Image (cartoon, rainbow, N blue to C red):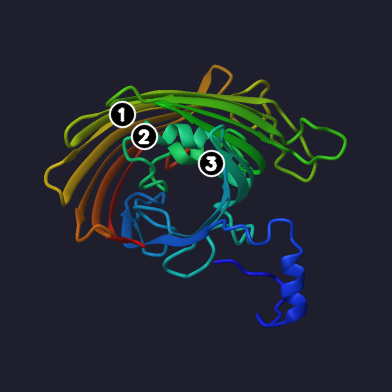
Amino acid sequence: MTIYGTFKEANDETNNEQIAKKPFAGTNYQSTINIYGTIDAGIRNVTNTTKDGGDTLKMGSNGEYYNNRIGIKGTEDLGGGMNAHFHLETGFNTGTGALDNNAGRMFNRISSVGVAGSFGSIDFGRMPSVSCKTIFAYDPFQYRYVQIIPLAGASAGNADGNFNGFPYGTIGGTRFSNDVQYIGKFDGLTVLAEYSAGEVAGSNSNGSAKAIGLTYRPGPFVIGAAYTRQKPNVATGSAVDYRDQDQITFGGAYQGDGWRIAGGHINTEAETAVKGINNQAKNSWIGASYDFTPAISVTTGYYRTTLATGSAETARRNLMIVGATYALSTHTNLYLGLDRAILSGFVSLPPGGKTRQTGTSFGINHMF
């Protein structure tokens, strides 16, 4: 589909004349536009969400099993093995219909345009970070249950807000705005690199980020690693305070006949600490999945998160989760998830004590 943006009638001679004067007018390049998405509706209950041991039951979410989204992707063949492409993707809450972010961004998930060829792909805009794309290869759940499993939120990215007590630059991450990203695929090797401009007056480093990542797929194996260097604003008040932060992640997975095992690690560390804010976050995990039948699949994983200031651990979360899906069709799944979290440190209820929380999630997910 091609739209010429003057809102003139197709038989308007002036409009046709202007099109004919374009340098590539009459070239038979083809373009395609695809609309896709997923919607997830379910119910989740979590125990011990209050100090007196009360439960919380909710339905409205951005997707308990798989994040809700509506996307538009377009590609134009430029000839010579090259194409121009764009990608827009927005998220939403099933229960309320609201956007999935507090910043009011229409295309909070992805907003990018780029070119691709035999050299790879270069894209500009807002998109999942190199760290996020690399971790996906060795997450046992491959970014399902992201509101529960910490990996997507722990990957490097712009923080939509800073929160006291959490490692800065890691909460609300996953994506970079103002990003230039390269992806090159060479047989089983994928090379990723990016630079996110901070757009801070008087400094090219403040608010910026740069990263490199590699994934390699020799047969049924996949191994990957990524390094990100960024300088986020860590201030919790009106004054700005930019600090250097490094993140490294690595891991691997093995795919067998109907089964898969995966594990990895993320280490995020700020070079200097800020009072009241942790400057280290570590995530380690291992898990596996098995397809009992073409319709029934079960995945389980163990995720350990620790937060620290210097060498002193301030919080810990051990999460065990089991998820099962039943495919009603190639596009529709019923799902059931059970998770158990053991918390300590400042994340526990009451503060300083240990809290065990049990979560139950079930619902339906449809992809189109």
Q: Circle 1 sits on which residue?
A: 262
Query: Which residue appears at 58% of the width and 33% of the height?
Result: 167
The answer to whether 315 appears left or right of 363 in the picture is right
Residue 81, numbered label: 3
Query: Which residue appears at 26% of the width and 49% of the height?
Result: 337
Which residue, as the protein is rendered here, is positioned at the far right? Answer: 202
Q: Earlier in the sequence, mark 2 or mark 3?
A: 3
Q: What type is the residue that disc 3 sits on?
A: Gly
Dot 1: element: strand
Q: What type is the residue that disc 2 sits on?
A: Asp
Dot 2: element: loop
Q: Is residue 47 visible?
A: yes
The answer to whether 78 appears left or right of 33 in the picture is right
From the viewer's perspective, is residue 364 above or below residue 228? below
| Disc 2 versus disc 3: nearer the observer | 3
| Disc 3 versus disc 1: nearer the observer | 3
From the viewer's perspective, is residue 110 above or below residue 258? below
Residue 139, numbered label: 2
Q: Earlier in the sequence, mark 3 or mark 1?
A: 3
| Residue contact at pointers 1 and 2, CB within 8 angstroms | yes
Q: Is residue 268 visible?
A: no
The answer to whether 239 appears left or right of 100 in the picture is right
**What is the x, y in percent for residue 321?**
28, 40
